[in-house]
Amino acid sequence: QKEVEQNSGPLSVPEGAIASLNCTYSDRVSQSFFWYRQYSGKSPELIMSIYSNGDKEDGRFTAQLNKASQYVSLLIRDSQPSDSATYLCAVNHVSNSGYALNFGKGTSLLVTP
Amino acid sequence: DAGITQSPRYKITETGRQVTLMCHQTWSHSYMFWYRQDLGHGLRLIYYSAAADITDKGEVPDGYVVSRSKTENFPLTLESATRSQTSVYFCASSESGGGDTQYFGPGTRLTVL
């Protein structure tokens, strides 16, 4: 089973600070990487996808990918209390049975006013 | 409304009973997925389907059956429910396989007594 690892947290940051969420993966041939946000009792929703090495920015969110190190991260600038949620890292892999996304267990983020 | 829906949203059943969870999407996405989410395990793939009449096992398929006679529907059946199948079940869909984004339904909370 291909692994996706995240610190479970909770990661606590003050409002206005930068939150840094990290993820490592074991499948060297993975090509697609996703960050989902999940509020308590709700379904995961996509924040960012990234496919190439480097940074990808979307508003207050920046995803960073380093395939050589098998590492993907999510930075949240100017963190707001509404960002408090669990963040799931997902990595695709292709197996004998086809395509799948592997999810990490998630990092819980708490933004304190 | 367009999107992906699941029914029922909440279900309580007894050990040994058959239960079917429904998933319907209006995007005409080719791929559909069933996940279960449990504390300590994160999201785990049960089954997925690349198209109508094409299904394949995920990480935890035992005790579950799926079918996909129409592109828009992907029901999940627990043939003889066990307490270990108490979980939150999410259906998801994506336009294509490979590295495409998956969109999640609202989830079904299933309790097996």
Image (cartoon, coloured by chain):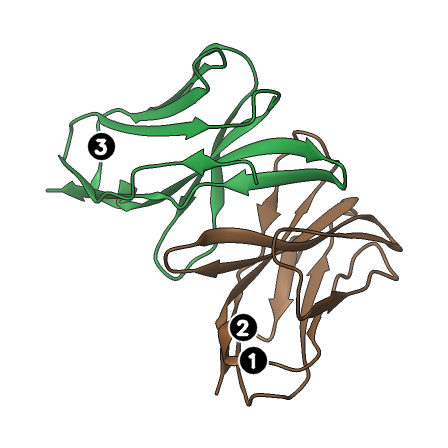
Chain colours: A green, B brown
Asked if marks 2 and 3 fall on the same chain, the answer is no
Which of the 4 quarters of the picture holds residue A56?
top left
Chain to which the residue tagged by mark 3 belongs: A
Whether residue A15 sits left or right of residue B26 in the image: it is left
Q: Which SS class for mark 3?
A: loop
Q: State yes or no: discs 2 and 3 in contact (Cβ < 8 Å).
A: no
Question: Could you tell me the amino acid type at mark 1?
Answer: Thr
Total numbered badges shown on the rendered structure:
3
Report the residue marked by disc 2. B85
Q: Are marks 2 and 1 in contact (CB under 8 Å)?
A: yes
Badge 1 is on which residue?
Answer: B82
Residue A107 x, y percent position in the rendering: 31, 42
Judging depth in this view, the residue of B25 and A13 nearest the camera is A13
| Quadrant hosting residue A104 | top left
C-alpha gap between disc 2 and disc 1: 5 Å
Looking at the picture, which amino acid does disc 3 mark? Ser
Question: How packed is label 3: few (under 14 Cα within 10 Å), some, or many (20 or more)?
Answer: many
Residue A98: quarter of image: top right
Residue type pointed to by label 2: Gln
Chain letter for mark 1, please.
B
- Going 74% across and 53% down the picture, which residue do you hit? B26
Which chain hosts label 2?
B
**Element under label 2?**
helix
Q: Nearer the viewer, mark 2 or mark 3?
A: 2
Residue A36: x percent and y percent? 45, 40
